[in-house]
Amino acid sequence: MKERIEQFLVFLNAEVGASSHTIKAYTEDLNEFQGFLENKRPQSIDNLDIRSFLASLHQKGLKKTSVARKLATVRSFFKYLHREGHVKKNPARLVSSPKIPKKLPRFLTVDEAFVLMEKPLGETFKPSRDKAILELLYSSGLRVSELTSLDIGDLDIKESLVRVKGKGRKERIIPVGSKAMYAIQNYLPERISSKRKSQALFLNNRGGRLTQRSVRRILIHYSRMVSLKGDLSPHVLRHTFATHLLHEGADLRSIQELLGHSSLSTTQKYTHVDIKHLMEVYDKAHPLAKETDKLKIK
């Protein structure tokens, strides 16, 4: 099985364009699966073997989300093997994923977001960089991986646009808000004056590309300064961006394009964030709702 796993990981990297983080997770999951089955040959593995593997994960106390992710990895692995003709069928298709309770995405209120944006103070390299990061995440809803992969050449300052490399190496052009672009323009002179040679837009103190972990630390630092409930993650700002757009009347298809979601169903979770707001929009906009109001007056 080891050889097939290595072939699958090469496929993910070369043809799918999976991120290093994704490949690392798949490697760990498949090595664990291989170890559980004691290197059993892929063509002899059936759905009962996979169920036994999942049962062992439950016994270890893994969360349902983690078990579901590992099952998804195994499914993708066997889908690849089946397509390449290494197995006659995909046994993972017969295994049900554990039911996971849906959680509403956490997001900041408008007031919380505005207070957070004002926290980085100063015109030197670090505070100007941090403010540009916060403003850009909130303005454009970028994933943290997309933010850290930005190069200077990805910016179009004149048109207030940025070219983003999303999942699967797909590129999209998205607008940047005026405050975010202003913050970036304030940061760029500090970045240039430090004589750093990297093409990365956001740099660390040593002149290298800022890592995803560093961005998370920056967000946690400022969220604690404004006493937000729970540590702030880049994904919370992404949810905040999408939720605030929805509240202001943006349609889901536009939000989908801005976020880089391949499926509209992924974006639809934002419709559950504030049902009260959606009902208010309906009452104000739908003709039948207006007719109902007239009947009430009579």
Image: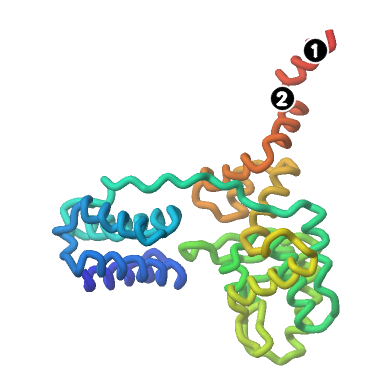
Residue at the spot of label 2: 286
- The residue positioned farthest toward the left in the image shown: 44
Q: Residues within 10 Å of mark 2 (few under 14, many from 20)?
A: few
Which residue is painted at 27% across and 52% down in the image? 51
User: What amino acid does circle 1 point to?
Assistant: Lys
Quadrant in which the N terminus is drawn: bottom left
Question: Are dots 1 and 2 in contact, CB under 8 Å?
Answer: no
Which residue is painted at 28% across and 58% down in the image? 53
The answer to whether 191 is drawn above or below residue 276 in the figure is: below
Residue 251 x/y as whole percent: 66, 41
Give the CA separation, mark 1 to mark 2. 16 Å
User: What amino acid does circle 2 point to?
Assistant: His
Q: How is the image coloured?
A: rainbow
Quadrant in which the C terminus is drawn: top right
Residue 275 x/y as whole percent: 67, 36
Which residue is painted at 78% across and 63% down in the image? 227
**SS category of the residue bearing label 1:** helix
The answer to whether 284 is drawn above or below residue 277 in the figure is: above
Which residue is painted at 20% across and 68% down in the image? 38
The answer to whether residue 31 is left or right of residue 125 is left
Residue at the spot of label 1: 296
